[in-house]
Amino acid sequence: MITTTDLTKAYDGALALDDVDLDVPDGVVYGLVGPNGAGKTTLLSILAGLRTPTSGTSSIDAEPSRIAVLPDAPRFEPWLTGREVVELAVHLAGHHPAPRSPDDVLAEAGLADAADRRVDGYSRGMLQRLGLAATVVSNPTVLLLDEPASALDPMGRREVLDLVRRLRGTSTVIFSSHILRDVEEVSDWIGILDDGRLRFQGPASELLGEGASRVFEVRARTGIDRAADVLADRDWVTSVEVLDDRVLRVVAASLDDAERHLLAAIVESGARVTSVAPVSPTLEEAFLEVTR
């Protein structure tokens, strides 16, 4: 549905995007993750036609009227009400296919009680949710969402993530965020953008499954901190995280290293171990491994 080839964007000689080859299948929620400054907004802006690349090409297999864009800080005419903003979005997008009910999308975005208020009284989080409502109301084929949950409180984030999840299979969504937990929750494909380069893209299961055999959870009655200190000094250990006073998570450089050395290092620490078990890595752990 969405592809780019050797896509590059330079600003005053500095590369914001460096030969990015994006490949987004039809109907997926594609989580585009990366730190601030990685190039996520630049990439989405080029896909939306708001910026031109320095070189390379991009293509979206959808009519321009069927592509909806949500910037990271949406703004609207201050004298309009929330309902009027959504109704205007329907008018601008046209009526083929039939749009959703403005009242329904406002309710899904948590704005039913504020629908008839002027938007100059909306908070930033409310404006973010209003932008998402205006984006989805026309049933677009493609949605480009730039940090849609970044300004929201926990309840607002939950409403936005639930709304994005429901789009899977009916629309193709690129969901850009630096909040890895959000991406992990709603995305079935993931792209990792770092310093302008696409370091990984593919099914979320592939990214999270690759490291499953190298991540272990260690439980002990006593001595977790001592075990963490001993493991942190080993060159075959990628990372160690103390989850609480009885549990730590350790990532080994390889399964072979873990099988050869993990138990011996824990015994050396003197920890009173109750279990050692492999676990699936989090998206954060996979992200750090890819960008290291």
Image (cartoon, grey):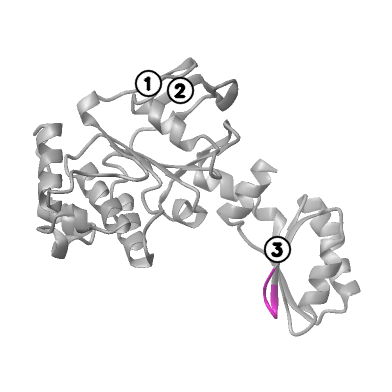
Residue count near mark 3 (Cα–Cα under 10 Å), binned few <14, some 14–19, many ≥20? many
Residue tagged by mark 2? 4
Q: Residue 18 placed where, x, y %?
A: 57, 24
Q: Residue 188 placed where, x, y %?
A: 43, 46
Marks 1 and 2: in contact by CB < 8 Å?
yes
Q: Quadrant of residue 151?
A: bottom left
Q: Residue at x 56, y 52 (%)?
A: 283
Local SS, label 2 = strand
Q: Tag 2: residue type?
A: Thr
Q: Tag 1: residue type?
A: Ser
On screen, residue 146 versus residue 97, left or right, reads right
Residue 1 visible here: no
Is 246 part of what is drawn in magenta? yes
Q: Tag 3: residue type?
A: Phe
Name the residue nearer the viewer: 167 or 117. Answer: 117
The magenta segment:
242-247
Q: Earlier in the sequence, mark 1 or mark 3?
A: 1
Residue tagged by mark 1? 59
